[in-house]
Amino acid sequence: MSALLTVEDLRVCYPTRTGMVEAVRGVSFALGRERLGIVGESGSGKSQTGRAIMGLTPPQAQVTAKTLSFDGIDLLSAPPKLRRSLRGKRIAMILQDPKYSLNPVMSIGRQIVETLREHEDVSGAEARERALEMLAAVQIRDPKRVFGLYPHEVSGGMGQRAMIAMMLVAGPELLIADEPTSALDVTVQLEVLSILDKLVAERGMGLIFVSHDLRLVSSFCDRVLVMYAGRIVEELAASDLANAKHPYTQGLFNCMPVIGADRHPLPVLDRKPEWAL
Amino acid sequence: MSAIVSVENLSVVFDDFTALENVSIDVSAGGSFGLVGESGSGKSTLLRAIAGLAPPAGGTMRIAGLELRGRDRDKAFYRAVQMVFQDPYGSLHPRQTIDRQLMEPLAIHGVRDGERRILKALDEVGLGSGFRFRYPHQLSGGQRQRVAIARALILEPSILLLDEPTSALDASVQAEVLNLLEQVRRDRKLTFVMVSHDLGVVTHMCDRLAVMQGGRVVERLTADDLATGRIDEDYTRNLMVASKGFRRHAEPIT
């Protein structure tokens, strides 16, 4: 399996008043055309890892790595123009909340067309056609109507489908999904996930799925990286989750209330300082 | 067994949209009642109507021995009933210290021993007195939700209305906050009415629950019913499936 993305010793530092804060501290992994989950709590550096790959780290932060290469392209030394052409075309990202990540003053259809025409030389009519196809592919029942709607006129689940359509319309090879369903209702979450799952499988994309929900990630991905305080503390096959060795992973796995399990009080994480070393 | 929260045939209408239609619930003193459903099912509106934040169009409410009409509530009501909101980032004043926010309900109700109560409330929710003079932005999401719980508890109410108290929190922090809520309920013999879209959380916290859809209660269950799968409505079954997480359908990939 040739690696689509290679990350070696990735570090992201933010300057603060009290000195440098390392949000990501030496993360390494290789990704083929597979589904990789990154799990951790708020502040564990999981989103920062995704953003660094995408090139969305704010300018004041420092990103360093021994290797950060996508399909043979060194992302850190790539000129901004090359990175811009990769972003959205070959690497795409789905963000958490469609309420904030869609442009509120532009219709959904126009946003999808904009993405497509930014990266491909297609006529307006063809772009519209492909945007409608894409909206149909994310199982929006009436693509023509939704095409003309503004983000505030659609529900959260519909907005997130539009977001997926927009990200997939240019046919990316790597998709980074940062908590793609956390802002959605439980019933809608599964629909959105199955759409995402189907499209990723059909198109043979690599997927990085970032979430704080270990159970969800393990049911969706092939392999899971567990992050704590900016480092990977454990890597496991999703099927092997019940045999997790690190107490942090076990804690994340056990802390969710489960129907039918009578556990009062719920087990909580007893965070040990040595985990963060 | 006397009902401390008794809502009968309550309706709430916003312009031409009916958010709640003839909803009735009864919660006995010391009980813990859950409301589940998807967005727009009216579960939060019911809670807000009880607290006087949504205008009732019909029906009767008897809460903590008080007969309620309209959305006017007196001080006695708020001494007995307090609410914790979903978003700890939005429900605390960003420019007031924790101390001042905890002082506010005490000042409104003319409670004298503020100092002692604030220290006690912070201690009870597991935040030391070191947090007293901080601002909300200096706290994490879980710590803020603890402050919101402290603020609700400081008047020593008998009923707590909880509107998705943990859905903005990480799974690991959620467990801590749920344990805290269970503990204060036990210690103070509180009555909970809790809204959540997560069936796992509701069955963990509540002994009885109502499933809502489109402004109506479609099913009433006990936590045991849910655990053993004694469910009548398809809608509830769908929620159950959803709460179990993602399952890949065995479809051949071509």
Image (cartoon, coloured by chain):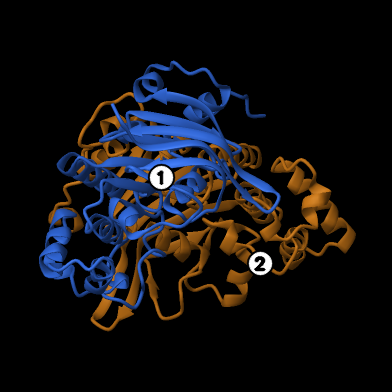
Chain colours: A orange, B blue
Q: Amino acid at mark 2?
A: Asn
Label 1: chain letter: B
B147, A13: nearer the viewer:
B147
Q: What numbered label is drawn on residue B67?
A: 1
Residue at (30%, 37%) from the top-left corner? A253
Please say if the residues under marks 1 and 2 sit with CB atoms less than 8 Å apart.
Answer: no
Quarter of the image for residue A79 reads bottom right
Q: Quadrant of the C terminus of chain A?
A: bottom left
Residue B188 rendering spot, x and y as whole percentages: 17, 44
Residue lying farthest bottom? A17
What's the CA distance linking mark 1 and mark 2?
A: 47 Å
Q: What numbered label is drawn on residue A103?
A: 2
Residue at (48%, 47%) from the top-left corner? B44
A131, B241: nearer the viewer:
B241
Residue B170 rendering spot, x and y as whole percentages: 35, 50
Residue at (37%, 43%) from the top-left corner? B63
From this view, report whether residue B244 is shown above or below residue A98: above
